[in-house]
Image (cartoon, rainbow, N blue to C red):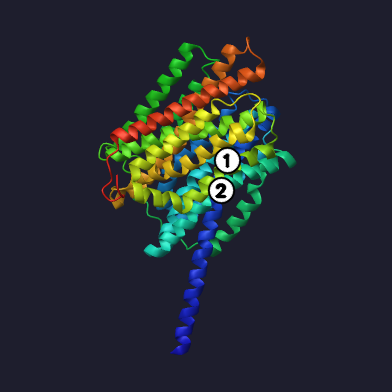
Amino acid sequence: MGEATGMRTRKQRQGDRRRWLALLLVCVAQFMLVVDGTVVNVALPKIQDSLSFSQVTLSWVVNAYLLTFGGFLLLGGRAGDLFGRRRVFIFGLALFTFASLLCGLAGSQGLLVAARALQGVGGAIIAPAALSIIITTFKGPKERARAMGIWGFVASSGGSVGVLLGGVLTETLGWPWIFFVNLPVGLAALALCRPLLAPDPAPEMRGGFDLPGALLITSSLVIAVYAIIGVGGNSLVGTALLLLLAATLTVAFAAVERRTAAPLVPPGVFASSRNLTVSNVVMALAILGLVGWFFFSALYLQKVLGYDSLATGLAYLPATIAMGALSYSAAARAVNRFGIKPMIIVGLGLMAIGLLLFARMPVGGSFLVDVLPGMLFLGVGTSLGLMAVILASTTGVPESEAGLASGLVNTSQQMGGALGLAVLASVAAAYTASISGSRPTVTALNSGYHAAFLVGAACLVLGALIAATLLLPPKDAGPE
C-alpha cells in the first residue's frame, strides 16, 4: 500500500514538473514573438541603409508582419481546435523559425518583406495555440492564475529585452542577427515540444476551416495599406481604385462569414456586445499611437540625434521597464480600484501626452530633457491603458465567446498597428517633402516625424473620448 502511494506521489510530482516545464516552453515561444516585435524597430535605420528602403517603404518591414499576424490570428486559433494544439504549435514554431532564417539571409527589399510576412503567419499560429495549451494544462483557478501571471510577465518583459537585444546585435554583429538569434531558440523549443507537451486528442473536424475568410480579410488589408503608403507615388485615380478593391474584398469577407459553417467572425457578434465593438475600436486607435511611437522615435534617435543602435536600445529601456513592471501587478490593482473605463481614459491620455512631448523634440535634443519624459509617459500609459481595454473587451462576454472576444481584440491590435503605421508614414513623408526645399534635410525630416507624432496623439485622444462616451461600465469590474 505504502509503495503504491509512493509511486502515485512520484508520478504526481513528475506530472507537475512536466506541466511547469511545458509552461516555460510556451512562454519561451511567446517571448520570442514579443522580442521580435520590438527588436526590429531598433534596427530599422540600418536595414533602411543596407537595402535602400525609402522612409515610406521601410514601414513594410513592420507592416508585413503585423498584417499577416492579425489576418491569420483567428484562423490560427481555429486550427488548434481542429488539428490539435500541440501539432499546430509545433508547425507554427517551425514556420516562424524558418522565416527568421529567410529574414536574416534577405538581400533585397522584396525578400525581407516576404519573409517578415511569413513570420507573421507563424506568429499567428503560435500565439493562440500557446495560450490554449496553458488554459488546458492548468485547470485549477489558483494554478491557472499563477500560470497566466507568469505568461503576462514574460510577454511584457519581452519588450525590454527586445529593444536592448536589437541594439546590441545590430551594433556588434549586424542587423541580420536580430533574426538569426531566433534559430537556436526555435530549434531548442522544437526539440522539447514532444517530451513536454501533452499529446493531442483525436482531431475534431466538425465545423470546417475558414481559410477563404482569412485570405480575403488579409488581402483587403494588404491592398489598403499599399494604397495608403503609395499615395506619394501613385495617381489619385490609382489610389482610389486600390481602396475600392480593398473595400470590395471586405464586403466579400462579410458575405463569406455569413455563409460558412465556422466563420472567423460570427455575424452579429459586434451588434450583440456594445463594449466589444467599442473596445476593439479603442484598441486599434491605441495601438496606432504605440506603433507610431516605436517606429518614428527609433528613426528620430538615429537619423536626427545620431545615436547608434546600442544607444537607441538603451534609450527605450525606461519605457519598456515601466511597461513590464506595471503590467505584472500595479496595473491590475489600479483597474480593480478605479475601474476599467477611468483607467482606459487615464492610460490613453498619458500616452497622448508622451506623443505630444515627442512632437516638440528639437534637432539638437538631449535624452534627459527631450526624450526621457515622453518615454516614461508612454510606458506608464501603455501599461494602464492596454490592460484596461483588453478587460473591457472580455468582461461580461459569455464564457463560450471569451476566446472569440480575446482573438478579436488581439486582431484589432495588429490591424490598428498596420493601417495606422501606413497612415503615419505617409503623413511624415508628405510633410517632409512639402518643406524639404526651404529647410535643411535633417530639420525637414524631423518636422515630418513631428507631424506623425501629432496625428498619433490625436488618435489616442479620440480613443479616450470614444471610451468615455460609449463604453458601458462593466458590472463586475470594479468601480466606475
In this rendering, is residue 2 above or below 80? below
Percent position of residue 337, x then y: 35, 50
The quadrant the N terminus occupies is bottom left
- Asked whether disc 2 touches disc 1, contact meaning CB atoms under 8 Å apart, the reply is yes
Secondary structure, mark 2, is helix
Task: State the image quarter where residue 203 is shown.
Answer: bottom left
Q: Amino acid at mark 1?
A: Thr
Count the marks: how many?
A: 2
Counting residues from the N terminus, which is met first, the one under dot 2 or under dot 1?
A: 1
| Left or right placement of residue 390 versus residue 123 in this view | left
Q: Residue furthest front?
A: 369
Residue located at (63% from left, 37% from top):
42
In this rendering, is residue 182 above or below 457? below
In this view, the residue in front, 304 or 402, is 304
Asked whether residue 176 appears in the rendered view, the answer is: no
Percent position of residue 192, x then y: 58, 60
Q: Amino acid at mark 2?
A: Gly
Can you tell which mark lies on residue 38? 1
Residue located at (30% from left, 52% from top):
399
In this view, the residue in front, 97 or 34, is 34
Q: What distance separates the C-alpha of mark 2 from that of mark 1?
A: 8 Å
Residue for badge 2:
158
Near mark 1 (Cα within 10 A), the count class, few <14, some 14-19 or many ≥20, is: many
Percent position of residue 86, x then y: 48, 56
Residue located at (62% from left, 36% from top):
368
Asked whether residue 118 appears in the rendered view, the answer is: yes
Residue located at (53% from left, 40% from top):
376
Near mark 2 (Cα within 10 A), the count class, few <14, some 14-19 or many ≥20, is: many
